[in-house]
Amino acid sequence: MQSTRLPCGTRAFQGSAPGVGCPSAGHGAASLLNARSFSPDAFTGTNSASHVVPTASRRCQHHKSDATYNRGLSCEHRYSSALSTSQLRSVTPSSTPSHHSSSSSFPSASSTSASPSPHSHLHPPTTSDLRLDLWLSLLQAAAAQLTSATTAATAAAGDVASRLQRLTQPPPPGFPAGPPGDQTLALLSDPLRFLSETTARYGPVVGLLLGGERVVLVSGRQEAHAVLVDQAGSVYGKAGTAFFPGSSLAGNGLLVSDGAVWQRQRRLATPAFRRTAVETYGSAMVSATEDMMGRVWGQGGTRDVYADFNELTLQVTLEALFGFTAPERKHQTQQQQSQQQPHSTWQQPHSSTSSSPASSSSSAASSEEARQIVAAVEKAFTFFTQRAATGFVIPEWLPTWDNLEFAAAVQQLDRVVYGMIARRREDLAARHGSVAAAAAAAAAARATATTPAVPGDLLTSLLLARDEDGYGMSDSALRDELMTLLVAGQETSAILLGWAAALLAAHPEVQQAAAAEVREVCGETAAPTAASVRHMPYLESIVLETLRLYSPAYMVGRCARVGTTLGDDGRYSLPAGTTVLVSPYVMHRDPTVWEQPEVFKPERWHELQSREGYQGYMGLMSGLGPNGAYLPFGGGPRNCIGSGFAMMEAMLVLSAVLQRYSLTLPYNSPASLPRPQPLLTLRPEAVVLRLTPRR
């Protein structure tokens, strides 16, 4: 397939990397060595073995116009039925390092073709079958990767020549001033220091040469507002942004899509993230937290709570996306749902309380699917952590062993997710006559404030979403959005919780006041709820201040689609194709905006919270915040769609933790705070804390 030249002078990136903070698309410094002008086939999965089943649909949809990209029935469903059973077997490497746990990565999977046998999991493949599956899958991946590599290498050769030429050329007229020479190594060696020192020396708009690319670093409020809000879409877009590590994992989801495709997907997904919808996941967040504390933390001790939060947020995200409930909580959750919703006609297809063989089989299949997703996601996260640590020197399309294993992990995810989408469509059609009828029933239930007779997870919400013409998402688009939400939602929340816990441990007086507020609202034993945390302004200020100091997305990228100007009276000239990097990390530490910007001061938010008409934390996320310099989830129309979900999860988890445990640093010294790891996102290193039960 021919690559497509974009207005920004670069070929399209159709993928996204996990751990980018949120779908507002943060850019990590570690991605700066990743060339931006590879063929789109290398990132969409059209030539990748990571999309064995949906390959045909990716090809056919690639040629559709933006307006019709997501409409109609998916090609995968039709294409997968023509594949042989051997092509749909799972991939089962015997031992793969895990980002979250020490368990082996790839469990066996049942076939997830259009009509899977409900008892297929009862007949596990033999060891020889699994070994053959692995090699077949890796050979498929190698063949596809070689094809992709040939195309991408050809495109990259021309791009390298252009970059080398820029190294000897002066900046274009009117380009912002900045440090001489290519600054890639300086940025990669210490990203946060480079950002702070460079903006301190050259001002809020800095011209840089990074990897042979002309880049503008922005930290001024006026300039950031122009890029992210005022001229978003018309002048500055996502397509063509340099140094963004594309990936087949998240596909063309909200994180990286642009133009009419992004606008349509955003409209379809927005209802699922309104406050009333997000609050329905509150009880699952608290239940998962209590399960972690009882099962893992127990009587306390010293633990890396960041690792624990990674597992917790993955469980919460899986439950919100797919309705997966941990086995320990499944029966209790079903009893609560039956008591709270006695008139609902829907039972989760894979969560029935019936003890019949069919229902037991479905429940086991659901648990197996969850296990497969966890294993594949852990493998993918490990892969991207390793790539980020090496500056993405080796592109994903190169057929190395690590890349092939990653392709197999994405293939595993695709098989499970596409199978779940197909079964959910079938379930809805069986109960309502068609998916469109189910969507109408759900809309009528919302209008009358009654319980809809459909599952409450995001998979169903996105599947039932309809545009103004009555069309929904295709399976391919739905898969991309689910994967984007999975990787971005899990990463962002874990980072926020890790930094918040570390800061609470480093400031005992703040922690004591927050714990007292939780006790005042919830008492000693009552679990926090989405309603009760609205009455915890001090805890809210702690979360807001944590995001100010350690926003997961410490750089946000855009590309100038056309030649434009920036700054007071248009003093700077930016040629078309210029990448603009806005730095929330620097803006959140601007001494002209923030008093004592390096100090953790939750009380700085109290004045805003006490203003008349204050509507909660989401009001502080609009635009670029109340002072024009607060953008922890991005800014403008492309701000993170899941910001409300992340904020509520942080409030609920922290309130539940503070209700039961006190947190202290191992050496009772602020110097033992974890160091930041500015890779794709601003992760903390291991957050090792001492946990002491309060009761």
Image: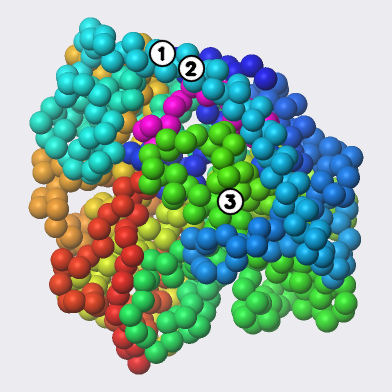
Q: Amino acid at mark 1?
A: Ala
Q: Amino acid at mark 3?
A: Ala
| Quadrant of the rendered image containing residue 298 | bottom left
Left or right? Give the position of 487 relative to 422.
left
Mark 3–mark 2 Cα distance, whole angstroms, equals: 43 Å
Quarter of the image containing the N terminus? Answer: top right
- Residue identified by numbered label 1: 161
Dot 1 and dot 2 residues touching (CB under 8 Å): yes
Residue at 38% across, 46% down = 389
Q: Whole-percent x and y of residue 166?
A: 31, 13
Magenta span covers which residues?
A: 31-48
Q: Whole-percent x and y of residue 523?
A: 37, 86
- Asked if residue 45 lies in the magenta stretch, the reply is yes
Q: Secondary structure at mark 1?
A: helix
- Residue identified by numbered label 3: 272
| Disc on res. 157 | 2
